[in-house]
Image (cartoon, rainbow, N blue to C red):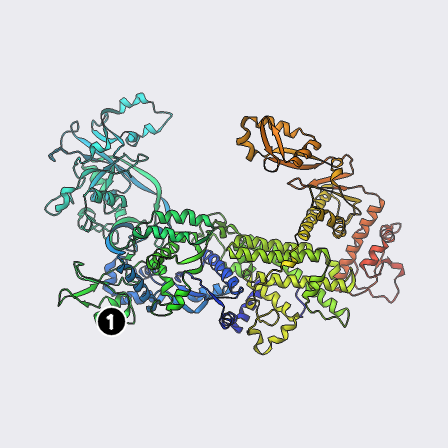
């Protein structure tokens, strides 16, 4: 085995492994081996991202989660088809093209030709696929890019048509109007999910406008100021006022008619909203009720329902002429609905049904408008006023506010003008303000199947569960009919052909069906191709049916992905049906209203099943300051730069070992990635290199030594640390299997990190001299090396799905020691059956199964006790500032209710390790009957538990329980309960107990665990023998450093000479008083004064050091 470098460039090593995988087609080979074995299928769906931008940390995070789970499944010998997909249609693509071609209006697309526009779109959809492939591959994610699917593929689009036709035939499709978030920059409606992606704080004009009440006969509204009574309504969207058709009040809210003292005008508004027109009422310090008389006179009081049906004078006359708008007879009256609130405004809401979802609903309910009827909507698809509003025709609605306000002011209808700062939705793609606009849409009847969707959600398993039960469940129970159409060009056309009045409608479900009905055979299903196709009418001979104008919302396409990626049902029918629902999917928290939702809706509508069984939801990756990552602000490091500096494994582990896999947010810190390298990979590599060095040393120490892994020798060892690390490894394997079966990555990663610490900081350190052959000879060295190899191999295979690169690096070295390594020649390494050594990649192997017989809880508990004692003992040394090189006379340990096994182990086989780690000469474990000589047991109330139970008695109880003696406290714990003023207090749950050191004597220094269940006390007496031993440790360390600097190996024997200043004998005394220590450390060679050095001796290295 080639010597390993002292330090490993992880990033460079990963690049070499990437090249090796590519050259040897490792991913394809893993898949081939799985298919040859006939492994059971494990279905995974990869949601399609847009390839119009580069991958960011959100993609990297979700991709890592998917890769970990699917790699683990493969290593459980399941076959996983991992196929990349691309979302090719929709707004992201069209917006880029509109920017590139300076398109601002739909008519411009029609002028240039939809075919040319779509071809331009097609040209950019895969612009970044190679960059995606490069980044994803460098990240270590294995996914099939060669056999990818694209939502613009004709086969994919045909399956989308099939999905829609199934819904159509089940009566789940209809056409109607819907007020939707609308991007005027992109000229298309957005889903509510998309509208929620980009909120910003903005300042908008806030107006209070008057609407003079008319008499019963329709007269009035033009009388004198003292006679006229006006309703007053508040709005932050003045541009919607020309489309006002009604006013709405709350049916049970109290309304009043007042006379404004200053203007002598009469207004009707909610009593609780007087502060809207008299802002001084909001100032609690200045406002006094007696001041009301100076502002207004109360004239009448109403309940909202009393006002319903009252008519008012329109603010504008654009839609008030019966000659041009016959429906206006239903307009300009008071309606009522419970959605009106009194938390802002006047308690009277202006209704423009073309621009408000509630407005549309309320006006529909009160017969102001009717389903299927066109409603006043003087705004085009680009947000420009039409000629119906001549004063602002051709002006964008947001720029028309001031002009309209001026008109309102001139007509005397402006009561108040202000500015309001509020949060407002912006288009996530164009970053321009959205409006709400009524658009004709094709809908899926989600409300009709809502109960089934909710029931199907209950059949799924989510991590974390609270997202399923909380956010997603709430979204489903309130789900509305889904508008699946978009008035755009680059998308899958909605396959409906109809006549002008929709009296004859045909829904097409396949290319063949279109061919049969139209006589036209097509190979592309995009709008520019199919729009020219007509279908002869069956009811009106001579007439033809034409396709409706709309295309599908791209969310409908991604929700159809399970079927369309396999061209179901036209191909792969049995394969799809056997693998549906999917075993696993994963995406970010934002997809609860996106992909997760559309998958669930369509699978329920088609098959009354959920689309997936198991789901991991990840949270958001934010910039280090907690803000959203922004390319413009450059507030996060480039992922490719991070990978090139620290390696992909470090980034993967950092992301997976964070709150983000529990659907919480992560503030990305580059230092965190570096921390993984320092705290996990470097120690693990050093332990691996230490094994290789000492295995090679062991082989070279005797010509008969040949290291061959022997599980038998591992099982036969009785060394307590061997037994412990083997038991801990088996426990880890068991834990990983259980937690991965539950998809809890957030518990697995911390366990792996903790184990690496146990292996490197404890097992290797405790056995360093033994593994070097300096303690117990060659036989003990080999046993330790066998155990370390066994653990390293198990952990390497176990960690492979999480950190695929470093584990591959370790495996390529470890496999060479296996007898089966010889079978890897001539293609054997890429064949079945797979086994460590023979197989060419760690990723071909089966995840190790745990050995029940090697699980040893006693060994684990005893080692945990050792670690607590050692760590607390070192804390004691630090408190007295005593170096570890200076021994201490004794360490005394008091354990709360230790098991017999722990006491026996600490006093027996583990005692030497504790003495060595603490550099103590004696270890005393205090028996229970003598505890009172060393510690005091104190009790305090568990306030969190006892608060409600004790109430006002808590203070007295605290005084009572904290005043108990050691003996009384022990008695209470042994009994398990305590009676206090008629109440029974349970010791285990309602009391907190702690041990504290109480022995007198200045030589003692102590510390205890935070839980107060372990106390370690050290006798810090420093006499001549102690100081001499400390100096000998310093000298041994100095000699070790010299040997290392000279490049000497452990087996190299050299003489050591020292020289001291005249009259100084510190070193000489230290050597003389501790001869045994030097002989044991340096194979019998004891340092001697320089005067005894032979003239022919060659100095390999020298240094000046200070001892003592």
Left or right of 1037, for residue 988: left
Tag 1 residue = 515
Q: Is residue 836 above or below residue 486?
A: below
**Where residue 877 appears, x then y in whole percent?**
73, 44
**Where residue 668 appears, x then y in whole percent?**
51, 52
**Where residue 357 appears, x then y in whole percent?**
27, 46
Count of residue discs: 1
Question: Seen from this angle, which residue lies furthest top?
Answer: 290
- x 12%, y 33%: residue: 216
Q: Quadrant of residue 997?
A: top right
Left or right of 57, for residue 221: left
Q: Quadrant of residue 270?
A: top left
Residue 379 in sight in this render: yes
Quarter of the rendering occupied by the N terminus: bottom right
| Near-viewer residue (825 or 229) | 825
**Where residue 221 appears, x then y in whole percent?**
14, 33
Q: Is residue 439 above or below residue 551?
A: above
Describe the element under mark 1 as helix, strand or loop.
Answer: helix
- x 16%, y 30%: residue: 228
Q: Quadrant of residue 599?
A: bottom left
Left or right of 540, for residue 925: right
Residue 182 in sight in this render: no
Q: Is residue 732 above or below residue 937?
A: below
| Near-viewer residue (176 or 433) | 176
| Near-viewer residue (1022 or 406) | 1022
Left or right of 899, for residue 411: left
Question: Seen from this angle, which residue lies furthest bottom?
Answer: 826
């Amino acid at each position: 085995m080639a010597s390993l470098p002292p330090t490993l460039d992880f990033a460079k090593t990963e690049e070499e492994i990437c090249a090796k995988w590519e050259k040897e087609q490792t991913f394809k080979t893993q898949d081939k081996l799985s298919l040859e074995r006939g492994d059971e299928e494990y279905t995974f769906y990869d949601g399609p991202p847009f390839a119009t931008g580069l991958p960011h940390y959100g993609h990297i995070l979700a991709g890592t989660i998917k890769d970990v789970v699917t790699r683990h499944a493969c290593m459980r010998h399941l076959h996983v088809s991992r196929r990349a997909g691309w979302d090719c249609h929709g707004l992201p693509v069209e917006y880029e093209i509109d920017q590139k071609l300076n398109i601002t209006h739909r008519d411009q697309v029609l002028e240039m030709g939809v075919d040319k526009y779509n071809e331009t779109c097609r040209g950019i959809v895969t612009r970044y696929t190679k960059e995606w492939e490069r980044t994803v591959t460098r990240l270590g994610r294995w996914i099939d890019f060669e056999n990818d699917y694209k939502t613009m593929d004709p086969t994919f689009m045909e399956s989308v048509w099939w999905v829609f036709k199934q819904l159509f035939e089940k009566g789940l499709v209809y056409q109607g109007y819907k007020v939707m978030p609308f991007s005027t920059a992109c000229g298309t409606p957005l889903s509510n999910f998309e509208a929620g992606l980009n909120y910003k704080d903005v300042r908008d004009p806030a107006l209070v406008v008057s609407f003079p009440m008319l008499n019963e006969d329709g007269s009035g509204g033009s009388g004198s100021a003292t006679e006229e009574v006006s309703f007053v309504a508040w709005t932050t969207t003045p541009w919607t006022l020309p489309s006002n058709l009604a006013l709405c009040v709350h049916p049970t809210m109290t309304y009043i008619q007042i006379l404004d003292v200053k203007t002598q005008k009469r207004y009707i508004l909610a009593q609780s909203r007087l502060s809207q027109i008299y802002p001084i009422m909001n100032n609690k310090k200045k406002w006094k009720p007696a001041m009301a008389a100076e502002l207004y006179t109360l004239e009448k009081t109403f309940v909202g329902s009393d006002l319903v049906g009252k008519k008012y004078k329109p603010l504008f006359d654009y839609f008030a002429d019966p000659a041009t708008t016959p429906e206006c007879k239903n307009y300009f009256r008071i309606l009522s609905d419970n959605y009106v609130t009194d938390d802002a405004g006047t308690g009277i809401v202006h209704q423009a049904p073309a621009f408000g979802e509630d407005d549309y609903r309320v006006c529909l309910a009160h017969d102001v408008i009717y389903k299927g009827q066109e409603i006043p909507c003087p705004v085009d698809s680009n947000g420009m006023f039409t000629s119906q509003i001549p004063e602002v025709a051709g002006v964008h609605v947001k720029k028309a506010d001031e002009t309209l306000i001026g008109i309102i002011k001139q007509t005397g209808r402006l009561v108040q003008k202000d500015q309001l700062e509020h949060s407002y939705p912006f288009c996530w793609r164009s970053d321009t303000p959205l409006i709400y606009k009524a658009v004709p849409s094709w809908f899926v009847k989600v409300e009709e199947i809502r109960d089934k969707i909710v029931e199907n959600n209950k059949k799924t398993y989510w991590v974390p569960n609270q997202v399923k039960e909380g956010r997603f469940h709430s979204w489903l129970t309130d789900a509305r009919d889904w508008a699946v159409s978009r008035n755009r060009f680059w998308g899958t056309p909605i396959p409906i052909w109809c006549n002008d009045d929709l009296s004859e409608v045909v829904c097409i479900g396949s290319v063949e069906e279109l061919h049969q009905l139209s006589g036209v055979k097509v190979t592309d299903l995009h709008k520019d191709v199919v729009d020219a196709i007509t279908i002869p009418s069956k009811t009106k001979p001579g007439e033809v049916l034409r396709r409706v104008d709309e295309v599908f919302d791209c969310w409908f396409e991604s929700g159809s992905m399970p079927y369309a990626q396999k061209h179901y049902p036209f191909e792969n029918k049995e394969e799809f049906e056997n693998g549906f629902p999917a075993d696993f999917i994963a995406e970010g928290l934002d997809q609860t209203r996106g992909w997760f939702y559309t998958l669930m809706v369509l699978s329920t509508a088609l098959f009354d099943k959920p689309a997936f069984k198991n789901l991991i939801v990840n949270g958001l990756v934010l910039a280090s300051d907690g803000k959203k990552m922004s390319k413009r602000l450059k507030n996060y490091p480039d992922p490719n730069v991070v990978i090139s500096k620290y390696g992909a494994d470090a980034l993967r582990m950092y992301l997976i070992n964070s709150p983000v896999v529990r659907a919480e947010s992560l503030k990305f810190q580059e230092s965190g990635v570096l921390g993984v390298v320092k705290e996990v990979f470097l120690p693990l590599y050093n332990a691996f290199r230490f094994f290789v060095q000492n295995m090679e040393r062991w082989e070279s120490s005797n010509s008969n030594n040949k290291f061959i892994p022997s599980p038998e020798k591992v099982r036969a060892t009785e060394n307590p640390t061997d037994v412990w690390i083997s038991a801990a490894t088996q426990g880890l394997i068991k834990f990983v299997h259980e937690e991965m079966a539950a998809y809890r990555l957030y518990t697995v990663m911390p366990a792996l990190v903790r184990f690496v610490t146990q292996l490197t900081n404890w097992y290797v350190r405790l056995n360093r001299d033994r593994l070097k052959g300096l303690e117990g000879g060659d036989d003990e060295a080999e046993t330790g090396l066998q155990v370390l190899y066994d653990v390293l191999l198990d952990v390497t295979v176990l960690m492979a799905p999480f950190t695929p690169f470093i584990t591959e690096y370790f495996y390529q070295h470890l496999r060479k020691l296996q007898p089966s390594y010889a079978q890897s020649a001539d293609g054997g390494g890429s064949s079945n059956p797979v086994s460590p050594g023979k197989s060419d990649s760690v990723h071909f192997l089966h995840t190790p199964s745990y050995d029940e017989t090697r699980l040893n809880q006693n060994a684990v508990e005893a080692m945990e006790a050792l670690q607590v004692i050692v760590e607390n003992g070192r804390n004691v040394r630090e408190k007295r500032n005593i170096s570890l090189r200076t021994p201490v006379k004794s360490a005394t340990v008091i354990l709360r209710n230790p098991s017999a096994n722990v006491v026996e182990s600490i006093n027996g086989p583990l005692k030497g390790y504790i003495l060595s780690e603490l550099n103590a000469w004696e270890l005393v474990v205090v028996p229970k009957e003598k505890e009172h000589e060393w510690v005091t047991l104190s009790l305090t109330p568990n306030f969190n538990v006892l608060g409600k139970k004790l109430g006002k008695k808590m203070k007295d109880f605290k005084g009572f329980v904290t005043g108990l003696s050691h003996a009384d406290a022990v008695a209470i714990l042994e009994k398990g309960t305590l009676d206090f003023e008629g109440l029974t207090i349970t010791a285990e749950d309602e009391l907190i107990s702690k041990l504290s050191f109480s022995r007198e004597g200045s030589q003692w220094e102590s510390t205890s665990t935070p839980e107060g269940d372990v106390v370690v006390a050290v006798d810090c007496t420093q006499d001549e023998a102690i100081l001499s031993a400390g100096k000998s440790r310093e000298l041994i360390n100095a000699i070790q450093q010299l040997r290392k600097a000279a490049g000497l190996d452990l087996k190299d024997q050299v003489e050591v000479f020292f020289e001291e200043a005249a009259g100084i004998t510190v070193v000489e005394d230290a050597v003389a008083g501790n001869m045994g220590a030097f002989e044991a450390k340096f194979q019998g060679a004891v340092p001697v004064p320089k005067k005894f050095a032979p003239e022919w001796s060659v100095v390999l290295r020298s240094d000046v050091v200070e001892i003592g």
